[in-house]
C-alpha cells in the first residue's frame, strides 16, 4: 500500500507577499542577492520560513523592520516564531536547527548583522 502525503505550504500574508514581489521585480539590485540566497536556503531547503500560527499566515519577512540592523539571533528567532515554535521549551531538540540557521545567516549575509535597508524592499 502506498501512503499519500499532503504538502503543507506556508502562505505569506499580503504585506509579505508584496515585499517578496518587490524583491523579485528588482533582480538587478545586487545587495539583495545574499538575502535571496539566505531565504532560499532557510525556506526552500530547510523548511523554516513560516506557517499558519493561530489562524494567521506568517512569514519570516513579516518581522523585518522598515529600518535598522537585523542580527542573526533576531532573524533565527523570527524563523521560529513564524513557524509557531518556541525553541526554549525544548532547547536540546532545537539547538542543531538554531546553529544551522545561524550559520546560514552568517554565510549568506557575510556577518552576524545586516542593515535591512540594503534589501530595498521598502522603496516606493
Image: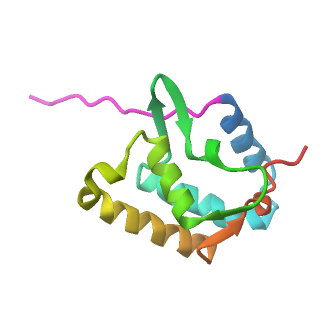
* Vertical comparison of 79 with 19: above or below: below
Residue 71 image offset from top left, x and y in percent: 60, 65
Q: Is residue 55 left or right of residue 1?
A: right
| Of 51 and 70, the residue lying toward us | 70
What colouring does the structure picture have? Answer: rainbow
Front in this rendered view, residue 113 or 51? 113
Residue at image coords 47%, 44%? 81
Residue 97 counted in the magenta span = no
Q: Which residue is situated farthest in the left direction here?
A: 1
**9 is higher (above) or lower (below) than 30:** above
Q: Where in the figure is residue 107, as x and y percent of width and height?
A: 54, 75
Residue 3 forms part of the magenta stretch:
yes
Q: Residue at x 68, y 29 (%)?
A: 14
- Seen in the picture, residue 26 relative to 21 is either above or below; the reply is below
Q: Residue furthest front?
A: 88
Image position of 110 with respect to 60: above or below: below
Query: Which of these two is toward me, 88 or 120?
Result: 88
Instruction: Residue at 40%, 67% (x, y): give it.
Output: 100
Query: How many dots with numbers?
Result: 0
Residue 98 drawn at (x, y percent): 39, 62
Q: Position of residue 20 (x, y in %)?
A: 69, 43
Q: Which residue reaches farthest right?
A: 124
Q: Magenta stretch?
A: 1-13
Amino acid at each position: 500500500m502506498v501512503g499519500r502525503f499532503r504538502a503543507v505550504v506556508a502562505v505569506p500574508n499580503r504585506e509579505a507577499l508584496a515585499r517578496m514581489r518587490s524583491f523579485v521585480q528588482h533582480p538587478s539590485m545586487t545587495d539583495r542577492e545574499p538575502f535571496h540566497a539566505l531565504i532560499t536556503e532557510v525556506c526552500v531547503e530547510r523548511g523554516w520560513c513560516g506557517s499558519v500560527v493561530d489562524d494567521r499566515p506568517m512569514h519570516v519577512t513579516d518581522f523585518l523592520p522598515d529600518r535598522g540592523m537585523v542580527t542573526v539571533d533576531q532573524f533565527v528567532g523570527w524563523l521560529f516564531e513564524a513557524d509557531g515554535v518556541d525553541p526554549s521549551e525544548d532547547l536540546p531538540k532545537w539547538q542543531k536547527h538554531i546553529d544551522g540557521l545561524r550559520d546560514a545567516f552568517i554565510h549568506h549575509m557575510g556577518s552576524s548583522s545586516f542593515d535591512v535597508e540594503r534589501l530595498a524592499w521598502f522603496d516606493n
